[in-house]
Image (cartoon, helix red, strand yellow):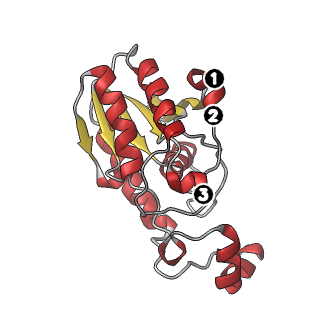
Amino acid sequence: MRLILVRHGQSEGNATGIVQGHLDFGLTELGMLQSEATAERLARMKIGRILSSPLVRAYQTAEAIAAATGLNIEPTPALMEYDVGAISGMTPEEIRNKHPEVIAARQRGERPAFPGEEGRAAFHVRVRGVIDAVRATDQTVVAVAHGGVIGAVCQIALGIDSGRRGLFEIANCSITQITEDRLGNLVILHHNDVCHLDNLVTRADRG
């Protein structure tokens, strides 16, 4: 089993600094260039399948990879970004102003949810389902997803509590590779690999 996780290219939401969650934004011009560079790299690898979050920013990234590899895209809703609920579309400043009680509680180390938020435990369950499905195959699978999803996969691989956030930097169109050792343990081979992006790297991660 080899799972190659690709974060989508820079989206319009990334460029404007908002928290996206399940909101749909397409790629910027820079995001398209990032996607094409990533596709060129992946085309040199032996890939069996392409899975993608159906959100536009991820799917457009997957389309570039599909064009370079000749593979079809399999829309996979379980790869959608974490649903942040009511704060979708807000800037960090707007979140602090509209939900000061949640921010204050989190600063105290508590874990209250924003209204309508998915919940980290449920999020990890759906992400783990994707991992399990890939583990059942012998293929190399590319999964085009989001920063939250890739971070969750890394947490699951390392056995880190689902409630801990922001542990992994995940740049736009970075590549993270997961495999298994001889005992069946998940292993992170590479994380946040941006070698193929040269001067195209963008690191803001709000979904």
Q: Earlier in the sequence, mark 3 or mark 2?
A: 3
Q: Which mark is residue 113?
A: none
Position of 128 compared to 17: left or right? Answer: left
Position of 184 compared to 98: left or right? Answer: left
Q: Is residue 79 visible?
A: yes
Helix, strand or loop at mark 2: loop
Please say if the residues under marks 1 and 2 sit with CB atoms less than 8 Å apart. Answer: yes
Q: Is residue 138 visible?
A: no
Q: Is 22 above or below relative to 113?
A: above
Position of 150 compared to 91: left or right? Answer: left
The answer to which of 104 and 23 lies nearer the viewer is 23
Work out which quarter of the rendered image holds the N terminus and state it. top left
Q: Is 181 above or below relative to 55?
A: above
Q: Nearer the viewer, mark 3 or mark 2?
A: 3
Please say if the residues under marks 3 and 2 sit with CB atoms less than 8 Å apart. Answer: no
Helix, strand or loop at mark 1: helix
The residue identified by callout 1 is 198
The answer to which of 32 and 70 lies nearer the viewer is 32
For the residues labelled 3 and 1, the Cα–Cα distance comes to 22 Å
Helix, strand or loop at mark 3: helix
- Pointer 2 local density, CA inside 10 Å: few below 14, some 14–19, many at least 20: some
The kind of residue on which mark 1 rests is Asp
Judged from this view, the residue extending furthest toward the front is: 29
The residue identified by callout 3 is 16
The kind of residue on which mark 2 rests is Val
Q: Which mark is residue 201?
A: 2
**Residue 14, horizontal then vertical, whole percent:** 57, 53
For the residues labelled 3 and 2, the Cα–Cα distance comes to 16 Å
Q: Which residue shows up at 47% across the image and 61% down it?
A: 82
Q: Earlier in the sequence, mark 3 or mark 1?
A: 3
